[in-house]
Amino acid sequence: MNRTVVTVRRETMFKDVVCALLASDAGAVPVVDDTDRPVGLVTEEALVAKLEFHGGNDPRPLLGGAKARNRWRQSAALTAGDLMTGPPTTVYGDTRIGRAAARLAHSQPLLCVVDEDMRLIGVLTARDLLSVYQRSDQSLIAEIHALLTPDVQRPARSPAPVTVQVDHGVVILDGSLTFRSRAEHAGYTVAHIPGVVAVHNNLTYDLDDLAITGF
């Protein structure tokens, strides 16, 4: 999440909105009210419409459908309030990365991160999420070993010998566990670690505790 947020108000003039967006280095700039609650977004596409239709002086487009007509209307806008779309998609600061990625994939160019009072505290972009893949292989190995501790425990026996290899974020798990459920849980757990690119789960097991019997 980027906590250094550039915002505008509904009454912010067009050129100032452009400057705010360029300063934010994002695909959109949040519009907030007097209490810093996000009420909309101004996207770069909305701003570029002024160049496309020369400030609304070009004829209304006959082709392109509703999207083209909407861009034509936005091209005459002078303030952020006229340019914005809303309400923006919001998430809380403790939202998991996978959930945030899903929200971002089906929404606007960025997510507005809010506190419990719905006040803007940051923004989240696809670039922010992708930064998790900058983690080193060694940091991933350390976290994997810590998370697998419950899975490698065996009743009345020493912990199972599980080896972890990571190369460019690709994880290889080798070894043998007591139960199939533990082996599958290990692969599932590792796949959900931020920064893991892929998991090759080669773990074997002694007992298939997931098999359905009695029929």
Image (tube, rainbow, N blue to C red):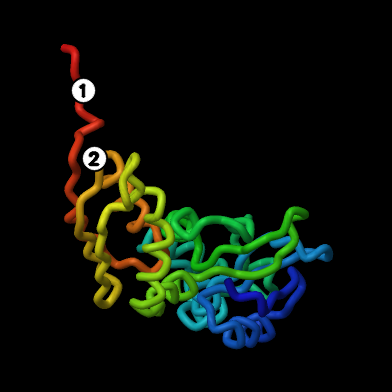
For the point 20% across and 51% down, the residue is 176
Identify which residue, 49 or 54, lies in the foreground.
Answer: 49
Q: How many marks?
A: 2
Q: Quadrant of the N terminus?
A: bottom right
Q: Say whether residue 62 is visible.
A: no
Identify which residue, 99 or 162, lies in the foreground.
Answer: 162
For the point 47% across and 67% down, the residue is 60
Q: Amino acid at mark 1?
A: Ile
Q: Compared with residue 101, is residue 176 higher up or lower down, i.e. above or below?
A: above
Callout 2: few (<14), some (14-19), or many (20+) C-alpha neighbours within 10 Å?
some
Secondary element at tag 2: helix
Residue 110 placement (x, y as % from top left): 53, 67
- Which residue is tagged 1? 212
Identify which residue, 32 or 67, lies in the foreground.
Answer: 32
- Which residue is tagged 2? 180
User: Residue 8 occupies which quadrant of the picture?
Assistant: bottom right
Q: Amino acid at mark 2?
A: Arg
Callout 1: few (<14), some (14-19), or many (20+) C-alpha neighbours within 10 Å?
few
